[in-house]
């Protein structure tokens, strides 16, 4: 990993670092050796920040599962507007940070498309992310 990428990882919240390491471990356990995929697994959530709490994640997941009305309703509670906006925008923000950290174009695209994969590597990333 390049120094800029390592610095990006070091700047992530501890929970996101742990999650990235777990995603990489899952990818490796499945036989993945693709360096760009592994770096994407490590950095895919670098655009999140400490303001995102468990309650925001639960509301986000419920909205994905049952409909956006949950997000609309929860936005009226304190901190939820910010937390949900960070979750909504984190894939693009993560891709921008990966670009600034000199990641390859493929790694950036894996990060950008993590919720709607466009290839087999992206589907592996999504599966590992959802498993962790």
Image: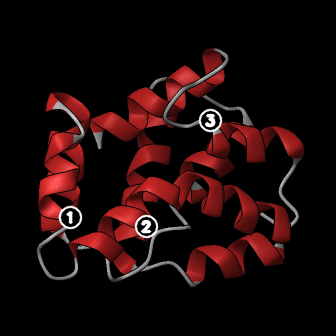
Vertical placement of residue 59 versus 65, above or below: below
Give the class, few, some or many, for how many residues have Cα within 10 Å of label 3's Cα (few <14, many ≥20).
many
- Residue 31, can we see it? no
Secondary structure found at label 3: loop
Say left or right for 37 vs 103.
left
Residue found 20% across the figure and 33% down from its top: 67
**In the image, residue 93 lies at what x, y percent?**
63, 63
What colour scheme does the image use? secondary structure
**In the image, residue 74 lies at what x, y percent?**
13, 61
Residue hosting label 1: 56
**In the image, residue 17 lies at what x, y percent?**
44, 69
Question: How many circles with numbers are drawn on the protein?
Answer: 3
Say left or right for 60 vs 38.
left
Give the class, few, some or many, for how many residues have Cα within 10 Å of label 1's Cα (few <14, many ≥20).
many
Where, quadrant-wise, is the N terminus in this rendering? bottom right
> For residue 25, which quarter of the picture?
top left
* Mark in front: 2 vs 3: 2
C-alpha separation, residue under disc 1 versus residue under disc 3: 21 Å
- Residue 104, can we see it? yes
**In the image, residue 85 lies at what x, y percent?**
40, 65
Secondary structure found at label 2: helix
Marks 2/1 in contact by CB < 8 Å: the verdict is: yes
C-alpha separation, residue under disc 2 versus residue under disc 1: 10 Å
Marks 1/3 in contact by CB < 8 Å: the verdict is: no
Give the class, few, some or many, for how many residues have Cα within 10 Å of label 2's Cα (few <14, many ≥20).
some
Residue found 74% across the figure and 63% down from its top: 96
State the residue in front, 14 or 54.
54
State the residue in front, 67 or 49.
67
Residue found 32% across the figure and 82% down from its top: 51
Residue hosting label 2: 86
Residue hosting label 3: 113
């Amino acid at each position: 990993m390049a120094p800029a990428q390592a610095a990006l990882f070091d700047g992530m919240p501890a929970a996101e670092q742990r999650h990235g390491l777990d995603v990489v471990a899952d990818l490796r356990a499945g036989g993945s050796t693709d360096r760009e995929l592994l770096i994407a697994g490590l950095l895919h959530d670098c655009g999140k920040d400490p303001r995102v709490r468990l309650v925001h994640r639960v509301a986000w997941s419920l909205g994905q599962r049952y409909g956006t009305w949950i997000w609309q309703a929860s936005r009226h509670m304190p901190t939820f507007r910010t937390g949900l906006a960070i979750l909504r925008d984190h894939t693009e923000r993560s891709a921008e940070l990966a670009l600034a950290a000199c990641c390859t174009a493929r790694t950036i695209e894996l990060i950008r498309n993590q919720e709607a994969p466009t290839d087999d590597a992206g589907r592996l990333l999504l599966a590992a992310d959802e498993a962790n």
